[in-house]
Image: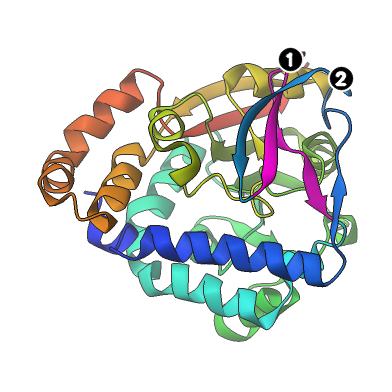
Amino acid sequence: MINLDKLRPINFNLNSEIKTRDAIKFVKKNHGFRKIIVCPVCKSKKKELYIIQNKIKIVTCRNCNLTYSEVQPQNFDDVYSSEDFLKKQINAYDKTRKYRIERFAVERIKILKKYKKKGSLLDFGCGTGWFLEEAKKHYKVNGVEYSDSIRKWLKSNLGITSFKDIAQIKEKYDIITAFDVIEHVPSPLNFLQKIKSKLKKDGLIFIYTPNIDSLGFSYLREKNNLLCPPHHLFYFNKNSFQFLCNKVKMKIVETQFKGLDIGDIYGLLNRQKSKKTANFLKMNFEKLQEFVDRNNYSNHIRFIIKNKN
């Protein structure tokens, strides 16, 4: 069962907004932003406005259907390597670590076990390591984490070795996971090419990312906590991700739609004191979200991908 009190407390939306605005201010104060002129995947200049969020334009490519932020940080350390970022990550995730392991990590391991019973696993963007804490019971694990402060925390608190950049890694892995990562990177195309280079020939990649063709994005619009540049820079749907896979000569072998659309809507309404509707969503969350998931309209989408033969 999903516990909305843990995952979407009454201050969740407000804290997300503050975190995003603070990140924008910090980037501007330090190295600033650079403008993205062409689509980072297909290089097309043809685009249309999707939404303006905190004065940042988010546009959709007319050629490959990728939605992306028109600006990116000049230096990603401005976003991910401060001590303040570590504190916010731990505050957001570590307080619910046990719950996240039991509810999400165990489920993801079951999906992976369908394809690989054992072997080596690399978790890209491992964060505070709650998934790796469960995964190391089944696989030999390492992580990749851009934040210097979080990598130090991982080693001292969980004994997990992680790398700042995938280029530092010499070995190849049976499984590479990237949960809520590809939307953060400077180039999804380069990212997928890099992690593919660290994959064994018969290995698999498990990617989890927001789905822009979803109830959550459609209903919440600018109030959507997932629309948060400079943290989230890219927004995929099934078609744009398929286009990306074709570019790197990989194939999708499984697609799942799973989300927290109802939870995110509940979180906003709960904050806005719309108690009657919020309580209805909370009481009927599982049934409503299952309906959304079954109709492929969830705000997250999962892909298992492999090399093309």
Q: Is residue 28 above or below residue 254?
A: below
Q: Is residue 233 above or below residue 15?
A: above
Name the amino acid type tagged 2. Answer: Ser
Q: Is residue 237 above or below residue 205?
A: above
Instruction: Decide which of 276, 88 is in the foreground and name it.
Output: 276
Distance between the Cα atoms at labels 2 and 1?
Answer: 8 Å
Residue 55 visible in the snapshot: yes
The C terminus is located in which quarter? top right
Residues at marks 2 and 1 touching, judged by CB atoms closer than 8 Å: yes
User: Which secondary structure is most common in the magenta stretch?
Assistant: strand
Instruction: Decide which of 21, 104 is in the foreground and name it.
Output: 21
Disc ID at residue 62: 1
Task: Determine the secondary structure under disc 2.
Answer: loop
User: Residue 282, percent across and down?
Assistant: 17, 47
Q: Is residue 66 magenta?
A: yes
User: Residue 306, percent across and down?
Assistant: 69, 27
Residue shown at the point (24%, 61%) measured from the top left: 5
Residue shown at the point (49%, 42%) measured from the top left: 222
Q: Which residues are magenta?
A: 55-73
User: Residue 84, percent across and down?
Assistant: 63, 80
Image quarter of residue 193: top right
Please give left or right for residue 275 compared with residue 59 in the image.
left
Please give left or right for residue 204 compared with residue 296 in the image.
right
Residue shown at the point (77%, 17%) measured from the top left: 246
Assess disc 2: are there few (<14), some (14-19) or many (≥20) residues with their C-alpha within 10 Å of its C-alpha.
some
Name the amino acid type tagged 1. Answer: Arg
Q: Is residue 278 above or below residue 60?
A: below
Instruction: Decide which of 245, 7 is in the foreground and name it.
Output: 7
Count numbered badges in the picture: 2
Mark 2 or mark 1: which comes first in sequence? 2
Disc ID at residue 44: 2
